[in-house]
Amino acid sequence: MNQRFRITRSMQENNEEQSISLEECKQYFASKPDFTYSPVLTVQGPESVMSIDGDFFMWAYENLQIPFRLYMGDLYVAIVNEAVVPQMIKVATDLRADVVEG
């Protein structure tokens, strides 16, 4: 099972904007050529297809599409590949946020 991490500002006491907004994410990720926005994540298994509604910023890495999901003011990402770690840290730094497991 993959580790999941949360990019959050909730632990910052003196930050006026503790939530990461959809508009902020859309502006930020629009400037990143390897990210695209999707309102639905589709996961295809060997025998079924599942669609999840939400706000997903899909990172294209090699032949993978890795979702960064905005949910209730935080971004979530699973470590499906080691390359996700530096990308996650860069996103958190740019958004002035922290990374926590969970």
Image (cartoon, rainbow, N blue to C red):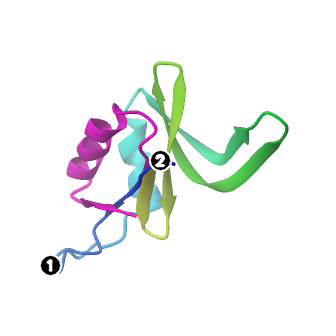
* Residue corresponding to mark 1: 14
Observer-nearest of 84 and 41? 84
Residue 81 against residue 24 in the figure, above or below = above
| Crowd class of label 1 (few under 14; some 14 to 19; many from 20; radius 10 Å) | few
Corner quadrant of residue 24: bottom left
- Residue reaching furthest to the top: 62
**SS under mark 1:** loop
Q: Residue at x 26, y 51 (%)?
A: 92
Horizontal side of residue 39 vs 18, given as left or right? right
Residue 99 against residue 12 in the figure, above or below = above
The spot of residue 98 in percent (x, y) is 24, 61
| Crowd class of label 2 (few under 14; some 14 to 19; many from 20; radius 10 Å) | few
The spot of residue 65 in percent (x, y) is 54, 31
The spot of residue 99 in percent (x, y) is 27, 58
Observer-nearest of 46 and 20? 46
How many dots with numbers?
2
- Residue reaching furthest to the right: 47
Q: Which numbered mark, 2 or 1, is in the foreground of this view?
A: 2
* Residue corresponding to mark 2: 2
